[in-house]
Image (tube, grey):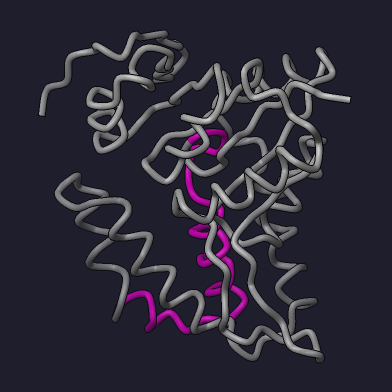
Amino acid sequence: MACIAAFFDIDGTLYRNSLMIQHFKKLIKYEVIEPSEWYAHVKNTYSKWESRYGDFEEYLEELATVYIDALKGVNKEHIDFIASQVIKINGDKVYKYARSRIEWHKKRKHKVFFISGSPDFLVDKMGKKYGVTECKGSKYVVDKNNNFTGEIIRMWDSVNKQKTLDALVNKYSIKLDSSYSYGDTTGDISMLKMVRNPIAINPNKELLFYIKNDTELYEKIQIIVERKDIIYKLNANVQTID
């Protein structure tokens, strides 16, 4: 039987930060990653982003490189424990609008999916917390001994997300002309374009510019900006000041 679905990105759309970043910090605390790795490879890019001179995506890519290399050879069971701590501490630090929309969809018996670039073992735990139908994250491959190999199957770009979305649409017979999606960056474009009701939550500048230049998306998308305790609903013709 065909059903209505809602597809949610996590980082920046539901969660107000990045699950991978928080896990990275915990791995330093638990001495899985040496603090020197942060200062040698990530701190400068992070400082530029924090002071709004740098780009968040550049910072995230640099951190991901160190993160993936650090996990190589580590047993997944040990990482799962640390991942559980991350969700326990950060799982409620989400945007009010996105959280309310998840509940709105669940009350209407819609299928709810988390599609995120964060590691699958973090995304799975976030999915269980919010009781979603199914979730997909970047797959971190393990060997026969359950140790990380250093190989990953990325889920933070639009192309790989599309493959996952297509599989879910077929599996659940989803009616795209009645479904919803929620995202915040260009990595979510395929997810936003494929449904009748796309919502951009706190979109970054690159995504907003894309929307303005894509007639199909421009005409149907709604933009939500949540700041402090106010939620703003905007049209795609919103003016920006650089």
Q: Residue furthest right?
A: 1
Segment tinted magenta in the rendering: 13-39
Residue nearer the viewer, 167 or 103: 167
Compared across the picture, whether 143 is left or right of 212 comes to right
Tell me residue 230's x, y (percent).
Answer: 44, 11
Q: Is residue 210 above or below residue 32?
A: above
In this view of the protein, which residue sits in the foreground, 70 or 93?
Answer: 70
Q: Is residue 40 left or right of residue 27?
A: left
Residue drawn where x is 58% and y is 32% of the image: 94
Give the residue displayed 61% in from the left and 45% down from the top. Answer: 115
Image location of residue 185, percent across then percent down: 38, 39
Could you tell me which quadrant the N terminus lies in? Answer: top right
What is the count of numbered marks? 0
100 is higher (above) or lower (below) than 48: above
In the orientation shown, which residue stands out farthest toward the left? Answer: 242
> Residue 54 appears at what percent x and percent y?
19, 52
Give the residue drawn at x 65%, y 21%.
Answer: 179
Residue 36 magenta? yes
